[in-house]
Amino acid sequence: MATTPKTAHEGFTLAELLVSVCVLLIIVFFVAQLMTTSTAITRPGNKHISTDTQARAVLDRIGLDLAQMLKRTDVDYYVKQPVNYNGHNNGHGWGRKIQTGQQGSDQIAFFTQVPGYYPAGAQSAISLVAYRVNQGSTSNPAWMRLERLAKGLRSNGADPGNGNNQIFPIVFSPGQISTKCNGGPCGAWGGPWAPAINNNTTCTTGTNNSNNSCDPNYEVIGPGVFRFEYYYVLKTGLATDIPWDRTILTSQTSITSPVSIGLNAVEAISVVIAVIDPDGRALMDANAAAGNASLLDLASDLADFSTAPGRGIGNQNKYIGGVEASWEATIDTWASTGLTSVPNSVPKAVASAIKIYSRTFDLKTLPTF
């Protein structure tokens, strides 16, 4: 019987092993690159989701408040205008920096038919609502965060006295919000809501004066919102930083002088906010502690709607979307150079994560002008 001769077991040659190892290394390299790229894409995406969610909640809240605003000529508004407004001390546009005695972000306060904080008793259906970015003190937990005040009002005409935490009644008369107390007592007819129109480091409890910025009814609704700006879209089609058309009301100096016009010349209010994610804010806080740029420096570099301080003439961004375009260009500068206009250094990663949002709210005011 014939037998088949045994053959030696075949194996991989050294060249084949080297080729296999090289192929395996290439595959591992591509997988690692894919994971790194996915992480790099996902991380900014998550940051943008955070800012998107926050901006949507803030703008929705502002929209609800404005939709219920009392639109009358015999009630007061604390809005951006050439006089009776402290938000910019009539603008800080020159050089895109906050000047001495001026605030960075806009402020707004108005009466609206939304619920407000009220301890007990005869609460009316009307509240005083105000918005501001707190720029009082770096030791304040709310510093450089968007705050909302919602203060419930009485439904009777009782004057509760001078205390800054008293619950005042709603009074249909101009000058109730923006009229200062000038350091003295304030009653229901003397501008009792100083916290709604001030934004400084002084926090005097138990009194009601022009320097009092504190109120227990303020709450942070935008922890990442460090810049707040708004402008008006008039019924004449103009976008402007004052709530009337100067070509029609040539002698008007405020919404109450020489005649009380309220916001009847305004078709809509456009709100623009700058939002930073929590990680970026932590980096900016550490950056400021090291003597570099702070969030206030960033807010200072974001120009007002009009670059001519409060006068509405010359070098304006007088079109819808102009503020947003200006802010985006400034953020691109931070991201590319790492410097503010001081100049102070800012982490480029922070700048690239800041996002700008805007929304226009129709006021549906009466077609008076």
Image: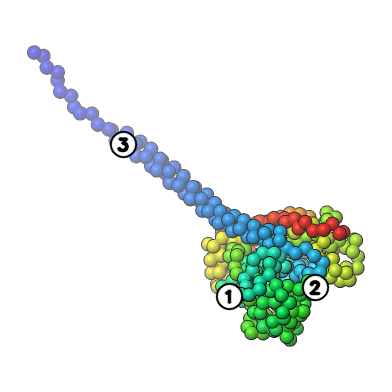
Q: How is the image coloured?
A: rainbow
Residue drawn at (59%, 68%), measured in percent from left and top?
Answer: 220
Q: Secondary structure at mark 1?
A: loop
Answer whether residue 301 is visible to the viewer in this image: no
Residue 173 is labelled as 2
Residue 218 locus on image (x, y percent)? 62, 71
- The mark lying in front, picked from 1 and 2, is 2
Give the residue at x 11% y 14%.
2
Q: Tell me which corner region of the image, top left, top right, bottom left or bottom right, holds residue 210.
A: bottom right
| Residue holding disc 1 | 140
Neighbours of disc 3 within 10 Å: few (<14), some (14-19), many (20+): few
Q: Position of residue 352 (x, y in %)?
A: 59, 57
CA–CA distance between discs 3 and 2? 91 Å
Label placed on residue 17: 3
* Residue 121 visible somewhere in the drawing: yes
Classify residue 138 by image quadrant.
Answer: bottom right
Q: Which amino acid is tagged 1? A: Asn
User: Mark 3 near mark 2, Cβ–Cβ under 8 Å?
Assistant: no
**What residue sits 43% from the left and 43% below the top?**
31
Q: Residue furthest top?
A: 1
Badge 3 or badge 2: first in the primary sequence = 3
Q: Amino acid at mark 2?
A: Ser
Q: Is 266 or 86 nearer to us in this picture?
A: 266
Whole-Å distance between the Cαs marked 1 and 2?
34 Å
Q: Are marks 3 and 1 in contact (CB under 8 Å)?
A: no
Left or right side of 279 for 5: left
Spot the residue most to the left: 1
